[in-house]
Amino acid sequence: GDKGGKTKSKTNKAHKASKYVGLENCLTAYQAILSNGNYKYSGAGVCLDDIAVKLTCKSSSKCSYAEHSLHPGSTYAMETCATFVPSDEIVYDAGSGTCTLGAEGIDLKSPRESSCRVPTAQLSFKMTFDAMDSSRVHIDFSRNGGDTFYTEEEGDSTRVAVPESLFERSLQDQGECGFVDLSKDFERVETALAQPLAERIPPRDNAFVRAVLVLENGKIVGEYKRDDVQLEARLIVHSLTKGLISLAIGKLIAEGDLRLDMPLGDIFSDEHWIGDNTDFRKRVTIRELLTMTSGLRGDLSTPPGDSLPEALYSPIVHEDSAKKEYSYLMDNNILSYVIYAITCSKDLWHCKRPIQYFAGSILPSLGVTGIGSCPAGSWNVAHENWSDYGNTDACSDGEFAWFTNEEGFEGATSGMTMTVNVMAKLGQLYLQGGKSAPGPGGEQVVPESWIDQTWTPHVKPPTIVGDNAGGFFWYQLDKDTWFSYGLGGQIIAVNRRLNRVVAMQSDLVGEGCPSIHVMRDIMKLNEGDFK
């Protein structure tokens, strides 16, 4: 987390005059700065954030500095690695009558880091102020231990922070930094693309990676394709389908026709229920299906359902099902039939299968109009051809298609096939809080509250990345990054702090999910690295 932006350098010109010349006035001004409380400066980072600054002292020998972004959604925050003694750190410049706290830099770290003994803690600050005036302070930062300091301000001037009451309405307005019109093609940042993506991350055996797009602030800043791959080619994204079908569920809930806690027994009438444990199955809710806590279980041998009765009956009810613990339901089509049933609930003219709902209500706002059609049973054919990595694609041309069961209903938990560009657009839609474009002209495709719920920890499954939190078919990689994953390494990952989206397509590979390590490497690149 440094604040990126322009990194103009200027030599540290503060010099150590006699330690005691003017020091008394400096310490008096410093006390006034403490009593003023919070300060604020503006224009930091790619989103031009407002930054709150606060100096505190527990005693005359234990002082600290901290700052954090006031931009909604930003997680940027820094603090001193250790407390400091002001009288040891303040230097007076008799020529200018100014005082400098930390003339050689005082080290900073992220609050989540226990000390500065970590590779990411490379930032230090200095603060300059007039010995007779506490109404403004000048703040600069260094990445090299105080040898040189940099600023983002025009004319190479320092950041100016002024007293600010943060108890008043001073939080930065919810901005749309990095939002783009998703109905248009992504803009390319050629200066960033000049350095190949593969050279930016640690070397690995990445032969399984087919294609990658990296967006930052809605622009393409990194891309990769294997020599035998076309970026325009579709690929089956397997269980990534789970993470994307939840968009339709969220939209239907927003339209008022569906509820998270609605049980399946309220959606499907009695003639569709067959077999045993019917009462248990009827009590399963939409929320439980989205969080894999329904108690229904299934693996590759469990049919996903070529009809509604089969989809409702095929999952296994286990002796531990009543505990409602996380249990991965690999393939099942219940949610596809939920979409159809809810759209039919107004009248039969509104009935829509999942691809019809996506093609009419979600994809057009993303500029995705090339929708391929798939023959009935195409899901079954594709998943029988594992020797071809499950990529047998019998659907007609288009940048997006969706395999179907024998009854012609799209697979709810796998079966979407799309280009890496469509994956990136869907990821950017999540980053933009469900909005298709900035400003009043942007359509709220799905409510921002649904994106927030999707990226809220609901369960702690033993996932492919360890014991991390799970949302609605999305998983938390770290504090800032959520991702959805399909078999073999079909990934959409979003980092809100960096305004970064990674879309990745991979061949099916062995154990260990190596594609996640590649995605993690890309997300570890610092803000400002793609310039």
Image (spheres, rainbow, N blue to C red):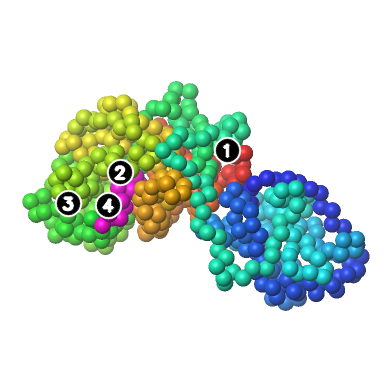
Is label 1 or label 4 in front? 4
Image quadrant in which you'd find residue 133: bottom right
Name the residue located 33 percent from the left edge and 48 percent from the top edge.
Answer: 247
Give the CA separation, mark 3 to mark 2: 16 Å
Name the residue located 84 percent from the left edge and 57 percent from the top edge.
Answer: 14
Residue 57: x %, y % from top left: 70, 73
Give residue 346's mark: 3
Q: Is residue 290 above or below residue 28?
A: above
Q: Which residue is mark 4?
A: 252
Residue 405: x %, y % from top left: 20, 37
Give the CA separation, mark 3 to mark 4: 12 Å
Label 4 neighbour load within 10 Å: few <14, some 14-19, many 20+:
some
Q: Secondary structure at mark 3?
A: loop
Pointer 1 or 2: first along the chain: 1
Q: Quadrant of the C terminus?
A: top right
Q: Secondary structure at mark 4?
A: helix
CB contact under 8 Å: marks 1 and 2: no
